[in-house]
Amino acid sequence: MSLLDTPIVQSLLDRVAGLDNDKGDARVKKITRRVVADMFRVIEDFDVTPDEFWSAVSYLTAVGQANEGGLLVPGLGIETFLDLRTDEAEKKAGLEGGTPRTIEGPLYIAGAPLTKGEARLDDGSEQGEVLFMDGQVRDLSGAPIANAIVDVWHANTLGGYSFFDPSQPKYNLRRRIETDVEGRYQFRSLLPNGYACPPDGQTQRYLNALGRHGQRPAHIHFFVSAPGFRKLTTQINIDGDEYLHDDFAFATRDDLIPPVVRVTDPAAIHARGVNAPFAQITFDFALHRDHAAAPATIVNRAHAEAA
Ligand code: MBD
Ligand code: FE
């Protein structure tokens, strides 16, 4: 019999999880019993040494100190698994179709400036390929949703996000756009580059041990919400990126890779008020109506707000 299965260890686990008292939180107790027992099992099955165990403890401590928990989670595919679980629950509740969800990631900042119909996301201080993006927010029957909020955020041409990269202006490349009466939104910005995990950070340290890179393809994040509809958390990828199908955060999905049109016609360039060829993306969002039988898609998660 393995040590784990002995009465001594089983009773230890019961007491660890507080199963011998009637206080505390029943769900926390139940899950703790399983998690700690599963960890004991890993230690036993892989003959984990005390040195290895304590190096894992210091690793997790360092992840917390570096505030990289939100980076490690997608790197280990856990955030994608949570999405797949929500997909599965929706399917079970009979919800199909609509724009696919994909992970939020760790770099959202609440409270970006809100404007009606359109916005410019950059302040003109950075050079890069200008992007014009537009589209319509609709319900599943194709009817436009007026006054939906398109909350958009993305990296700059160096793959950095404002707030986390203090060299960028406040709320740079972050806006909330309220759709017009036809459910339309549009914005001007700069094509982002892909994000890379900090090379000397804790997440990359783990990825190195797995023989993995920490690169994301260029992408643009969205929360799309409207009263009476399920909140959509998603991203689009910039087609052609070398990491398009090799994302360390596993967020690329079919139907989230719209064509990028390169506009070079001088008249079209002039009409847009720019002085060089630009990129243009059209992408529509299809939202599900609120549905009592499916779990809510609003995820309560700590978000910083720009000071
Ligand atoms: C990002 O920009 C991102 O979207 C995710 C999921 C992880 C790290 C950086
Ligand atoms: Fe991102």
Image (tube, rainbow, N blue to C red):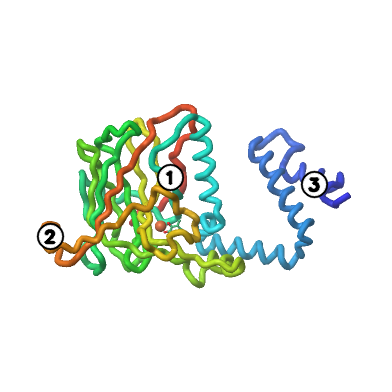
Q: Is mark 2 within 8 Å of ligand 2?
A: no
| Front-most of residues 113 and 233 | 233
> Can you tell which mark lies on residue 139?
none
The quarter of the displayed image where residue 226 is located: top left
Q: Are marks 3 and 2 in contact (CB under 8 Å)?
A: no
Q: Residue at x 44, y 66 (%)?
A: 196
Disc 2: which residue: 273
The quarter of the displayed image where residue 273 is located: bottom left
User: Which tag, 3 or 2, sits closer to the chain's start?
Assistant: 3
Crowd band around label 2 with a 10 angstrom C-alpha radius: few (<14), some (14–19), many (20+) = few
Disc 1: which residue: 101
**Mark 1 secondary-structure assignment:** loop
Tell us which disc is closer to us: 3 or 2.
2
Q: Are marks 2 and 1 in contact (CB under 8 Å)?
A: no
- Above or below, 246 against 301 in this view is below
CA separation in Å, label 1 and label 3: 42 Å
Visible residue check, residue 163:
no
- Above or below, 133 against 19 in this view is below
- Above or below, 292 against 182 in this view is above
Visible residue check, residue 178:
yes
Type of the residue with mark 3? Leu
Q: Is mark 1 within 8 Å of ligand 1?
A: no
Type of the residue with mark 1? Arg
> Can you tell which mark lies on residue 12?
3
Type of the residue with mark 2? Gly
Q: Position of residue 229 (x, y in %)?
A: 36, 33
